[in-house]
Image (cartoon, grey):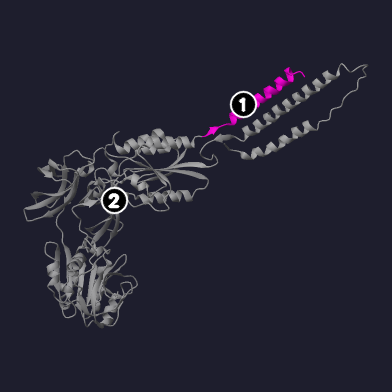
Amino acid sequence: MQFHNPTILYFLVLLIIPVLVHLFQLQKFVKVPFTNVALLQKLVQETRKSSRLKKWLILCTRLLLFSAILFAFSQPYISNKNTTENQQTFIYLDNSLSTNTSGEKGDLLQISAKEIIENASQKDIYSLQTNDAFFKDITYSELKNELLKIKNTSKKIELNSVLLKINSLKNNKTNTSFKNILISDYQHTYNKKFTNVTPSFSAIKIEAIKKDNISIDSVFISNTNNNNLTLNVVVKNQGEEKKNIPIAIFNDTKLISKQSYSIKKDALKTIPFTIQNQDTFLGKIQVTFSDTFSFDNTFYFSINATKKTNVLSIGNETNFMSKIFTEDEFNFTQSSLQNVNYNTIQKQQLIVLNELEKIPEILSKSILEFSKKGGNIVVIPNENSNLESYNIFLEKFENTKIGAKISDTLKITDINFSHPLFINVFQNKVLNFQYPTTSSHYPISSKNSSKIISFENGLPFISQIKNDEQNLYLFSSAINKNNSNFMNSPLIVPVFYNFGIMSFQHSKIYYYLDEENKIDIETNLEKDEILNISNATSSFIPEQQTFQNKVSITTNEQPNNAGFYYILRKKDTLQTVAFNTPKEESAVQFLDLTSLKESNPKMTVSNDISTVFKDLNENNEVHWLWKWFLALAIVSLLLEIFILKFYKP
């Protein structure tokens, strides 16, 4: 038994007063002369005993009366929680795309929301976390309103982020009792997210009926000519072998081609389509099959008019660049220093200063202007570089300088695999390959640079110097055959190819939602003019950076739904891009919470929402006892009245 106002119980000490009064009460006896008291002696003794008993009974009833009243005012109760603490329930409801499927009772997300509404206490305060929103300190009615509006989203939230949110709320509140409930399908992406500081929580796993799935994994183009191209659709099967599955391709709403295919158990299959080569193609691929997830049976892609990246090499003429910057992707031009057409510099996306002995002032100014307008620069020094002209040019890039040449043969051994230049280049980290070497190099010092490739002694071979406006790739050594065998290394192709590809982010044939995507749009905007992205149902202004000849757009938080989106300048469509749901959501691999619980003792496991909330409500239920003590006080008062009125000693 607990007390809401325990301080009132201190007044029980005052009950000693009536006891003392009773014990020390002095009675005065009146003497009455009587001739013979022998016959009255027995009667007097019996009367005194009865009177004393009556007084003790009255004392007990009064003590019981006052005690009951004091206990009633102290508000005693029976409960598993302390009524002086606030009760808050934290609920994480996973509304990722993987919960957009059918369980035993219906749609996983909607049924979960319904059961929370039906079983949650109307007295508690709640915090609701979903994958795309957080609602803090809300009442039951507010919780109900948010759950009725909940929808699936492509956005993902890591489970450790949810647990950190719980700890943050707990640390910011005092005198509050927390109950944490995490409702999810616990897709494999949640694995290994628990730590020693994990708060206690109830894990409720919601499960789909079906356990196999067909999804469109990716799309790529091959065998392009003037008339046709081959569109390759990669389909992924999770589960048993499947046969005669229909698949169709549309150009916007027009059916272009349709076929059926069979796929083996847990396999990938590439299905080719031959389509007409067009400047604009709004492609939609659709698989007709009833499986675990329906959102991944449709895939969007867009083919826009082919644009090439403009690359200019100034300096020594080389064959390797023309082989890397091929005609199908690049407009590549080589020019000697004497024959540079300065009028074309500002039209380039990438300029390579290839082993110039000296960087003239007029060229330096043109290149710096080009750089400030968003152009990328690659600088490869000469074996006999004029350091003064180089450093006058380089100091404009974060105070970068190169020192005197060091003639020392060094191996090029270290690759920064996490650098954006090498994303999707290596499947695994290459730790043992034939290291290229250089005979001499120039030490680089810079205020702000990152290593891309390094020598065996840790000094940079290729550095990136970047700020909000400028982007420079700087070699510390000449790479001609007299000074280095880097041209013979497999590294040279991805390095220079990605120099070109990353200089202008042409739109891809598709993007994924909830990822950072960069798109460059060739256009000249007026002052205070911006681009926006829209479709038939939504419109938003993306993060963008304006340069003289292009606008660099970055999307991340938006858009929210798969489909086609139009990049607009006022009302003019500059480009059409396609977004698809993240393919990770198509996985049908889920955690076994029972085995996971063995390493997480603070975690309780259930698959029934109503049971968890029922137990929570029972634990939080308060049984007040003050009414019983008030009734006892009334009974005590009635007993005293009864004794006084009817008990005659």
* The N terminus, quarter of image: top right
Image quadrant assignment for residue 141: top left
Q: Residue at x 70, y 38 (%)?
A: 13
Q: Is residue 604 left or right of residue 316?
A: right
Magenta residues, as a range?
A: 622-649
User: Which residue type carries mark 1?
Assistant: Ala
**Which SS class for mark 1?**
helix
Q: Is 503 rendered above or below residue 576? A: below
For residue 571, say whether it is visible: no
Numbered tag placed on residue 514 in the rendering:
2
Q: Residue at x 65, y 25 (%)?
A: 634
Left/right placement of residue 23 relative to residue 413 reads right
- Of the image marks 1 and 2, the number of the one nearer the N terminus: 2
Camera-nearest residue between 63 and 157: 63
In this view, the mark in front (1 or 2): 1
Q: Secondary structure at mark 2?
A: loop
- At horizontal 20% and vertical 65% (from top left) the residue drawn is 498
Residue 260 appears in the picture as rendered: yes
Q: Position of residue 333 (x, y in %)?
A: 14, 70
Q: Amino acid at mark 2?
A: Asp
Is residue 518 inside the magenta stretch? Answer: no
Q: Look at the image and tell me in which quarter the C terminus lies.
A: top right
Seen from the viewer's position, the closer of residues 112 and 347 is: 112
Q: As displayed, is residue 499 above or below residue 616?
A: below
Q: CA distance from mark 1 to mark 2?
A: 64 Å
Classify residue 343 by image quadrant.
bottom left
Residue topped by disc 1? 631
